[in-house]
Image (spheres, rainbow, N blue to C red):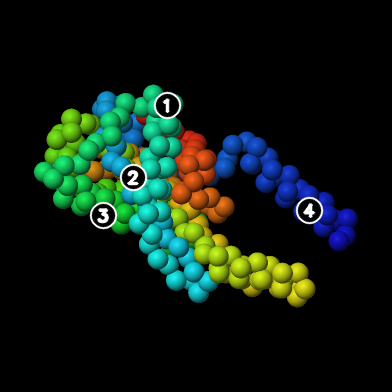
Amino acid sequence: MSHLNFRKYLSIFLIVLMILLSGCVPKNYKTHPQYDISCKSINKYCLIKPEVKIVSLSAGGVTEVRDDWCAQGLENVLSALQKNLDRENVNYKLINIDENINKDIEDIQALYRAVSQSIRIHAMGPGPHMFPDKAASFEYSIGPIDSVLDYYDCDGLIIVYGTDAISTGGRKALMALGAVAGVFTGVVVMPGGGATTVNFALIDKNGDILYYTSKEGGGFDLRQPGSALSFVDQVLAEYPECIR
């Protein structure tokens, strides 16, 4: 590399470093344009028990939902979530869903899953399907939920959805073989490990998503309390000011 090219690349590196150090790193969350106003009208949040889906991932890429893992993941994510909310002095109550309102809650959760997927693809990015207008003006809704909130005497809703894929022994062995082969050939071709995702949203009575954050990472296991707590801590590292 010539001296001129070295100085060119060094200058680019220093510019990028200055941007990162100046705090211009993209935020890991989105807020509604009216967030600052709307959130002030929320005095107490209803917290629905998180939905947590954990699957086993075979060597051939086949997934199987494990109900026992899902139950353990739910317990761990809920505990981690409550520790975070308590630490931030958030006024919330964990609601017990009874038969009178169960169908409405299921509808809310189903709508949220669909909207959450759209947010991650079109508003969070990066990716070929990201819409600049959605990223710039974050306006998503699941429709009015005032009847449910009134039923539980709340002003807002906290909803959380998590997934995890746990590689089987066979898949881990295949990954190890791929890594070893890569040492000799210089080309690493092996299946990826499972990914952990958790997203978190604050929703008002109109169904508007006021705040949304999502994280995906590897090397975590929602079945393990410590791992789940560490991951949820990262998901909620940037609390919205109004909720504190």
Q: Residue at x 40, y 27 (%)?
A: 86
Residue 88, numbered label? 1
The first of marks 3 and 1 along the sequence is: 1
Image quadrant containing the N terminus: bottom right
Q: Do the residues labelled 4 and 1 touch (CB within 8 Å)?
A: no
The nearer-to-camera label among 4 and 2 is: 2
Alpha-carbon distance for marks 3 and 2?
A: 12 Å
- Mark 3: few/some/many CA within 10 Å (<14, 14-19, 20+): few
| Residue ID for mark 2 | 50
Identity of the amino acid at label 4? Lys
Image quadrant containing the C terminus: top left
Q: Where is residue 91 in the image (x, y as percent from the top left)?
A: 32, 26
Viewed as shown, does residue 87 lie left or right of 148?
Answer: right
Q: Residue at x 35, y 52 (%)?
A: 116
Residue 8, numbered label? 4
Q: Position of residue 174 (x, y in %)?
A: 60, 71
Identity of the amino acid at label 2? Pro
Of 241 and 130, which appears nearest the observer? 241
Secondary element under disc 3, as helix, strand or loop, is helix
The first of marks 3 and 4 along the sequence is: 4
The first of marks 1 and 2 along the sequence is: 2
Secondary element under disc 1, as helix, strand or loop, is loop
Q: Is residue 145 visible?
A: yes
Number of numbered tags placed on the structure image: 4
Q: Residue at x 58, y 65 (%)?
A: 172
* Whether residue 170 is situated above or below residue 127 in the rendered picture: below
Residue lying at the far left in this picture: please name it.
Answer: 100
| Residue ID for mark 3 | 110
Identity of the amino acid at label 3? Ala
Q: Is residue 192 visible?
A: no
